[in-house]
Amino acid sequence: MNKRARRIVWIRRFVQTVALVLFLVLLTANRPANIAAPTAPVSFFFDLNPLVMISTWLATHTFEGLSLLAVLTLVVTVVFGRVFCGWFCPLGTLNNIIGSLRQSFRRITRQKEGFSRWQRAKYFVLVAMLAMSAAGAQWMGVLDPFSLLYRSIALTVMPILDIAMSATANVIYLSDPSIGALHLRDLSEPIYRWWQDSITATEVRVFSGSGPVFLIFIAVLVLNLVRNRFWCRYICPLGALLGTFSVRPFLRLVSDPEACNNCAHCTKACPAAAQPELPGQWLATECFGCWNCVDTCQNEALDFKWTLPVSRTSSGTMDIGRRRVLTSLAAGGGGLAMMSMTPQTQGLTNNPQLIRPPGSRPEQDFLDRCVRCGMCMQTCPSGGLQPTWGEAGLEGLWSPMLFLKNP
């Protein structure tokens, strides 16, 4: 067994855990505040996201401050490949966790998964979404993994946990189960107060139209039981963007055909179906740099080595095809046309119920910059900001609007 690879795998798991915990910590740090905005860098992950940076630039022709940190992500990708997906992305980590449960479903899941041509689909999604952004319909936030994860947790998971905590605390408080002088509510009440003060900082809140958001989130996780990291393989536009920048990374997988005995252990261990079992056909654009294949190779026939980017050694190609790219561009145009086929989008009518957050930019400029993450809705102290469903048309799906509470 390659001891160096084993250490790197455990380092990668540690980094993944830290990144996921950091994401959740920053999410909870963005709790409602009556006076000042949160001091923690709650937008850190979005600042590192090149997909948000590029799509926003295409829509507005401007770069927003710290979003230039996303250039760092692209530089790392050019050198190391898609390690951002395999080491840092919190949604990818959650997918990994759910995918590890596939061992319990051996009778209904395939244990050996080779490369599928359907993995090209995420590149077509990326092309279509970028075309829509360039044409003035910024919808990237609907599929961006950071926006999807933040929106799902902030608008659905957190309210569900809040309701469950409140209901449980009330039941324990009213029933007051006890053993002698030991009362269970003496334990539950401090926990509930900590939850309210440190996590939610407000009364129980729910968000309109959150059902579809929750169902999509559950579907993204459950699909890992069908194919490991299903979202990352077939749909994720950020993964496609990073794959485009990792065509010829400096760090590449090299195989020794003479040492390989075709045991297929590397294929089973690869969460990306990057073809580590095929000498000279390893797909750098799909590889997450997780080192699972090197770790599981009992003959030490695989290893990552530094290679000049001009070399084509030990790497295959992802054949996307010009016709498919043109079809994706046409699909993006069709999506733009579908969004434009409303009187509101054409500026022929105005929805009096659509009130944007205070200080918002003009409507189109606002939609060009909004990534539908739900951050502003989560931090609103009154709970008045809610996600739109049809009030802003299809283009404004899940963008924030101000709901007036009943007196």
Image: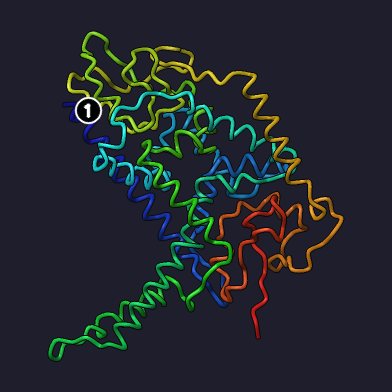
Residue in the foreground of this view, choosing between 352 and 368: 352
Q: Which of 399 and 287 lies nearest the eye of the viewer? A: 399
Q: How many marks?
A: 1
- The residue most toward the front is 107
Query: For residue 135, which quarter of the picture?
Result: top right
Question: In the figure, 67 relative to 118: above or below?
Answer: below
**Which residue is situated farthest in the right direction here?**
348
Residue 370: image x %, image y %?
A: 65, 53
Q: Which residue is pictured at 72% across the width and 54% down the height?
A: 393
Helix, strand or loop status at disc 1 = helix
Tell me which residue sits at (71%, 44%) in the image.
137
Percent position of residue 320, x then y: 56, 21
Instruction: Find the residue positioned furthest to the left.
Output: 180
Residue 28 occupies which quadrant of the picture? bottom left
The quarter of the rendered structure image containing the C terminus is bottom right
Task: Measuring from the top left, give residue 60's x and y in whole percent.
Answer: 73, 45
Residue depicted at x 54% and y 48%: 47
Q: Which residue is mark 1?
A: 296
- Note whether 207 is above or below 228 in the view shown: below
Instruction: Compare residues 195 and 262 and report the one nearer the observer.
Output: 262
Q: Residue at x 77, y 46 (%)?
A: 340
How is the protein colored in the picture? rainbow
**On screen, 9 above or below 258?**
below
Q: Position of residue 208 (x, y in %)?
A: 58, 66
Residue 237 vs residue 399: left or right? left
In the image, 16: left or right of 125?
left
Q: Quadrant of the N terminus?
A: top left
Kind of residue indicated by mark 1? Thr
- Counting other residues with Cα less than 10 Å from the Cα at mark 1, is it few (<14), some (14-19), or many (20 or more)? many
